[in-house]
Every structure is written in C-alpha cells, then in structure tokens.
Image (cartoon, grey):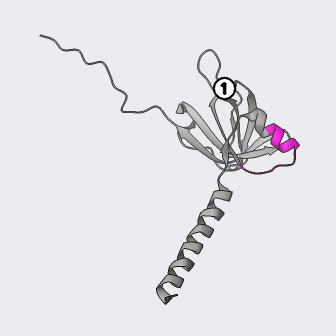
Amino acid sequence: MKKSHIIGMIVIAMAIGIIMSTAGDASTYVSFGEAIERAKDGDDTKVHVVGRLKKDAQGHIVGMQYDPTRDPNYFTFTLVDTNRVEQRVVYFQPKPQDFERSEQVVITGNMQNQVFVADKILLKCPSKYVEKEVTASL
C-alpha cells in the first residue's frame, strides 16, 4: 500500500471515532413521564423536554421562584410538557433573560429526587417578525 492510502485510512478512522463519540453525548427528546421512568431505572443520561410555562387565567406564570438577593444561582419553575404533565424544574443558574415572555421552553437535564434538574434552558420567544394584517385604503 502507498503511504497516502494508509494516511487516508487513518484520517477516516479518526473521523468515524469522533462522530461516534459525539453521537454518544446527544440526548433525546422525551416527556416528563419517560424522564421519570428513566430515573427509576437508574438511567441518568441527559434528555430534552419541551413544554410551556404553567400560567393562571390572567396569563401570569404560576410557581416561578427566583430571588437574586438570596441566591442568584437558584431558579425554579413549573413546566407543562406536551402530554400536559406538570413538573417542578430546578435550574442552578440565574434566570434567563425574557423568561416570562417565552412561548415554549426546551430544557436539558435529568430527574433527581422527584424534580427535574436542568443544565440548559432554551427559550422560544414571540417573534418580532410576526406577519401583521396590512390594510390598503383606496
């Protein structure tokens, strides 16, 4: 074999190794029910859960607690997943900016002691590019 063929095979093997290692870190999208089942089975892998904030009839967020003067790295709230299961979420970081305005929330983490401990919070906020009705006057 030529030296270039050997180097090519080594590069391909390294690329496959890198792809396999990053694929192992990828988490899956689940509901809170499945996250609870995984925790009961001893599976502590990170998962994504998609949901909406729990709100009252007036549109105010229910169950959100954040006091930056007491502990700026403790934020907790209630999230309702796509199956309408409510779950308490704890985030050991400051509250994300514009959290109250978000339409949808994606959290990454796992269940621990009957609460979901989030490592990351991704917010889907209302778009400022929403198409508005245009009226033309003649």
Q: In this figure, which residue is indicated by the disc labeled 1?
A: 54
Taking 103 as reference, is 116 above or below it? below
Can residue 62 be seen here? yes
Residue 52 percent across, percent down from the top left: 62, 29
* Amino acid type, mark 1: Lys
Specify whether residue 43 is painted magenta.
yes
Residue 94 percent across, percent down from the top left: 64, 48
- For the point 54% across and 84% down, which residue is it? 6
- For the point 84% across and 38% down, which residue is it? 114
Residue sitting farthest toward the top = 138
Counting every numbered tag in the picture gives: 1
- For the point 59% across and 73% down, which residue is it? 13
Mark 1 lies on a secondary structure that is: loop
Q: Front-most of 68 and 107?
A: 107
| Label 1, residues with CA under 10 Å away: few <14, some 14-19, many ≥20 | some
Residue 90 percent across, percent down from the top left: 74, 42
User: Which corner quadrant of the image does residue 60 belong to?
Assistant: top right
Taking 136 as reference, is 107 above or below it? below
Residue sitting farthest toward the left = 138
Residue 115 percent across, percent down from the top left: 80, 39
Which region is colored magenta?
Answer: 36-46
Specify whether residue 119 is painted magenta.
no
Q: Front-most of 132 and 76?
A: 132
User: Which corner quadrant of the image does residue 33 belong to?
Assistant: top right
Q: For the C terminus, give its image quadrant.
A: top left
Can residue 68 be seen here? no
Residue sitting farthest toward the front = 1
